[in-house]
Amino acid sequence: MLISSIIIPSAPFASTWNKTAINYIYNLSLSFLRRFSRRKDCHLFSFSIYSSHSFSTVKKPFAYSNFVNHRLLSGMASASSEVALDLSPLIKVYKDGHVERLAGNDVVPPSHDPETNVESKDVVISEDEDITARIYLHKGDTSQKLPLLVYFHGGGFCMETPYSANYHGFVNSLVCQTHIIAVSVHYRRSPEHPVPIAHEDSWTSLKWIASHSDGTGPEDWLNRHADFNKVFFAGDSAGANLAHHMGIRVGTHGLPGVNLEGIALVHPYFWGTERIGSEAEKAEHVPLVDNLWRYTCPTTTGSDDPLINPSKDPNLGKLGSKRVLVFIAENDLLKDRGLYYKELLEKSGWEGAVDVMESKGEGHVFHLFSPTSENSVSLFSRLASFIKP
């Protein structure tokens, strides 16, 4: 027996998204599907919600259905408990082909946050390629154009979304402190969509964003409020990798209508075959990074692929921004890659300024898990001042 799709039509939710309704539908459906998941002849579940509310210009399957799918699947027993590849704490791959994402499956709906006075909404960038984004706008002074931040979430190219609590909270708070407009991009993830699809989706997103620079794009918030002379890219981990490569593409291909003011890389996911700095002292963690990269990018030439190792990229000196800020964490395995990136940029012929901020005693993307800690607040403040001094 194969259940390929369960379609639950959701009534149009007037002007605001009804969180109680989606939770009720989710819990009811999960209870139903769990009963079927115990059957040996039931292999696949899919869950879709249709609504005309969230996407202002297109009536299509509601974007949350993609992420609810992952929640449903991760909440049910796999048809096979035999693990083929264990990349904990990110994902597990089972011999029956089932992929279990171990974090980042939660979904926070867009809303107006009364505590931050930031409003968010979801948009479709490419319906055919299933690329979406969440836009954030501070509702204070909207009489003038605001700096535009394009944010790329992390997760090893295989997990997390802009809609999870960690990323929604982070970008929402950043927009509140800086009074900017932000677009948090949801690219397709590996293994279903192997790298470099994430890079291509990110570039598609940037071209869609740039289409608003003359005030005639499909999204009103960007037309009315975004200052395309003050654009910033930022991301953490794999998202920092994407922000870097998008900066390279701006420098090599151009992005008409957009002036890229700066790029912020938080704990960037770069790697290489040669151990540098303290990596040799953390040898037990090296295989995870090697295996994760080969799994998410099966066509790669290895850990010296220019997609993961900037030192092998002949276009590094063409980075399309004059300001770069790199964040590293003392206990992060990737720390030395961030330091090396600064060194590489300065030797590449790139005519810009790059700074590094190190958080002592912290690990990879610690700020997402302890956002109110002293070091997280310091990181947050430095990032905010970089975007809007």
Image (cartoon, rainbow, N blue to C red):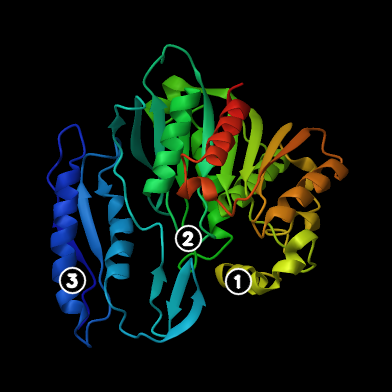
Note whether 31 is above or below 94 in the view shown: above
Under mark 3, the amino acid is: Leu
- Kindly indicate whether the residue at mark 2 contacts the one at mark 1 (C-beta within 8 angstroms): no
Question: Residue at 53% across / 59% down in the picture?
Answer: 157
The mark lying in front, picked from 2 and 3, is 3
Q: Secondary structure at mark 1?
A: helix
Q: Which residue is mark 3?
A: 33
Q: Earlier in the sequence, mark 1 or mark 2?
A: 2
Q: In front here: 238 or 340?
A: 340
Circle 2 crowding by C-alpha within 10 Å: few under 14, some 14–19, many from 20: many
Q: Secondary structure at mark 2?
A: loop
Circle 1 crowding by C-alpha within 10 Å: few under 14, some 14–19, many from 20: some
Q: Position of residue 194 (x, y in %)?
A: 53, 66
- The answer to which image quadrant residue 48 occupies is bottom left
Question: Residue at 61% across / 48% down in the picture?
Answer: 240
Label placed on residue 288: 1
Note whether 371 is above or below 87 in the view shown: above
